[in-house]
Amino acid sequence: TRNLIELFQKYGGRYDFDWMDLVAQAFRESRLDQSKQSRAGAIGIMQIKPSTAADPNVGIKNIETLENNIHAGVKYLAFVRDRYFSDSGISASSRLNFSLAAYNAGPRRIVAARQKAADQGLDPNLWFDNVELVVAQTVGREPVDYVRDIRAYVIALGLYEENLKRNFDRESLKR
């Protein structure tokens, strides 16, 4: 587990993501199972397709290995964020939510949903209660549930980490 966290911290740091967001995404994708394969051909802990990993914008080989799979998934998430959701009007939190939705459903669908949200008088720079509503109508529930689940897992991870620290501090005080 420590090695896994260290890998998410390493690539989170390299590509400017909080490691807990990445762990939560990997949990949603594969339940942290590197051996998982989808019917669509996605593999590993990050459920990335070999064709995506081989794309020049990602360029990571051997995604059958845990570290390379994490690296490819995080690098692709960063590519999507930086290519499609870098507008200065988007908060860091919404940028992450758009990127996660795009990882799940494809960036062009989320970009189109942002435009449609604007056309409907919704805020195209906000995921929750704005673009997510259009995505649910036009793409389906899967990307909406995907983002919601990951955000919930991050909260749970944060509470778990907080509890571990609190218990560790109590044990330290007893010594």
Image (cartoon, rainbow, N blue to C red):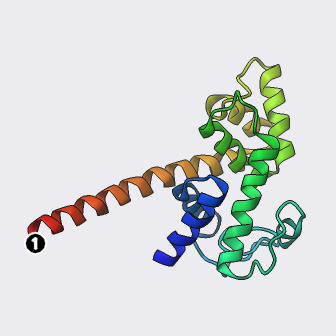
Q: Name the amino acid, label 1.
A: Arg
Q: Is residue 66 visible?
A: yes
Question: How many numbered marks are there?
Answer: 1
Q: Quadrant of residue 66?
A: bottom right
- Expressed as whole percent of the image width and height from the top left, the position of residue 61 reads 81, 77
Of the pair 86 and 130, the residue shown nearer to us? 86
> In the picture shown, does residue 160 fall above or below 54?
above
On the image, which quarter does residue 168 sit in? Answer: bottom left
Q: What element carries label 1?
A: loop
Find residue 89 and report its image quarter.
Answer: top right
Q: Is residue 54 toward the left or the right of residue 128 in the image?
A: right
Q: Position of residue 71 (x, y in %)?
A: 70, 68
Q: Is residue 22 left or right of residue 52?
A: left
Question: Residue 47: in sight, yes or no?
Answer: no
Residue 37 percent across, percent down from the top left? 73, 76
Relative vertical location of residue 53 with respect to residue 125 in this rendering, above or below: below
Residue 92 location in percent, x, y? 62, 38
Q: In which quarter of the image is the C terminus?
A: bottom left
Above or below 122: residue 175: below
Find disc 1 in the rendering and name its residue. Answer: 175
Q: Residue at x 79, y 20 (%)?
A: 120
Q: Nearer the viewer, residue 138 or 151?
A: 151
Residue drawn at x 73%, y 53% is 78
